């Protein structure tokens, strides 16, 4: 109960997170959010895009410690309502009820047993076997879709961008719609990357790395926590790719 109360206060939760990051460094562990916070502070004029923001936990981390302008994208109505309410009146954060993909228009979004697994893609049979009801589809919702390139050109042209993506296997669609921005505007990509089959037609770590490193010339800075399925098999992790040798710390 006490930790929950402490996290309600911005000052105390920042202190707790800084202490945890220090403990990780001393123990020799990689720290994803520590690297992201340092990166954002080193580039205070860069815009942070949180694509797949869900209810805003990562947005809160950036907002608490960094001066950067933040744009949070969440396509599903239920999660977006929570996200928007959470940051209502916060001038640093703008929330967008929008999916980012390879084209512009409307599409069906798959709503699953656990909302964090909602995706533009349908769950695979292997994913259902590994995660059961958590990833089983319960309904669909029509959502608006735009490309990353078109959104950036309209809303923040000429700005440097730090991109965080948690799009549940739809990274290929995101990067297809953001190819020009990956070449010109985006200085860092922090993304979840799947190791096992979760969704039909998903991208995995190796494809994401091929797109970012092989096609666009990014450098793989680090790979972070490895999540596992019910059988203990490696299933997903997070990665940080930087343009050139841009320092993360």
Image (cartoon, helix red, strand yellow):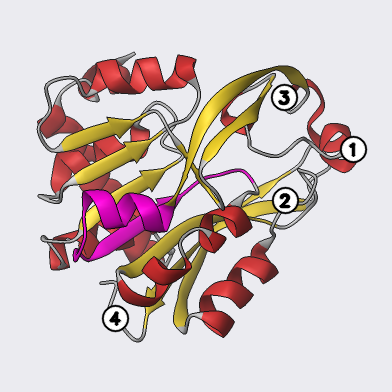
Q: Which residue is mark 1?
A: 125
Q: What is the CA distance from the residue labelled 3 to the residue labelled 4? A: 38 Å
Q: What is the CA distance from the residue labelled 2 to the residue labelled 3? A: 14 Å
Question: Residue 23 in the image: x percent, y percent?
Answer: 32, 55
Sequence-first disc among 2 and 1: 1
Q: Which mark identifies residue 134?
A: 3
Residues in magenta, as a range: 148-168
Mark 3 burial class by Cα count in 10 Å: few <14, some 14-19, many 20+: some
Helix, strand or loop status at disc 2 = strand
Direction from residue 109 to residue 80 in the image, left or right: left
Q: What is the CA distance from the residue labelled 1 to the residue labelled 3? A: 13 Å
Direction from residue 15 to residue 102 in the image, left or right: right
Of labels 2 and 1, the one closer to you: 1
Task: Reply above or below: 158 against 201.
Answer: below
Question: Residue 224 in the image: x percent, y percent?
Answer: 51, 60
Q: Mark 4 near mark 2, Cβ–Cβ under 8 Å? A: no
Task: Reply above or below: 122 against 206.
Answer: above
Question: Residue 209 in the image: x percent, y percent?
Answer: 59, 73
Say which residue appears at 58% left-offset and 73% top-offset.
211
Find out whether residue 186 is within the magenta segment.
Answer: no
Residue 78 versus residue 227: which sits nearer the camera? 78
Sequence-first disc among 4 and 2: 2
Q: Which residue is mark 2?
A: 235
Sequence-first disc among 3 and 4: 3
Asked if residue 144 shows in the view, the reply is: yes
Q: Which mark identifies residue 246?
A: 4
């Amino acid at each position: 109960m006490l930790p929950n109360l402490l996290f309600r206060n911005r000052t105390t939760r920042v202190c707790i997170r800084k202490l945890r990051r220090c403990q990780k460094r001393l123990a020799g562990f990689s720290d994803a959010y520590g690297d992201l916070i340092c990166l954002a502070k080193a580039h205070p004029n860069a815009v942070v895009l949180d694509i797949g923001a869900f209810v805003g936990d990562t947005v809160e981390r950036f907002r608490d410690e960094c001066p950067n302008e933040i744009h949070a994208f969440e396509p599903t109505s239920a999660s977006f309502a929570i996200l928007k309410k959470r940051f209502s009146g916060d001038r640093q954060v703008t929330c967008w009820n929008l999916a980012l993909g390879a084209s512009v228009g409307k599409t069906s979004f798959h709503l699953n047993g656990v909302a964090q697994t909602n995706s533009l893609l349908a769950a695979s049979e292997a994913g259902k076997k590994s995660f059961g009801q958590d990833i089983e589809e319960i309904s669909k919702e029509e959502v608006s879709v735009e490309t990353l390139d078109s959104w950036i050109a309209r809303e923040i042209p000429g700005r440097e961008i730090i991109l965080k993506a948690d799009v549940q296997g739809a990274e290929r669609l995101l990067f297809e719609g953001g190819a020009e921005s990956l070449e010109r505007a985006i200085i860092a990509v922090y993304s979840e990357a799947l190791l096992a089959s979760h969704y039909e037609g998903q991208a995995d770590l190796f494809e994401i790395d091929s797109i970012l490193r092989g096609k666009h010339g990014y450098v793989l800075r680090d790979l972070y926590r490895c999540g596992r399925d019910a059988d203990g098999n490696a299933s997903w992790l997070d990665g940080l790719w930087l343009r050139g040798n841009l320092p993360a710390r």
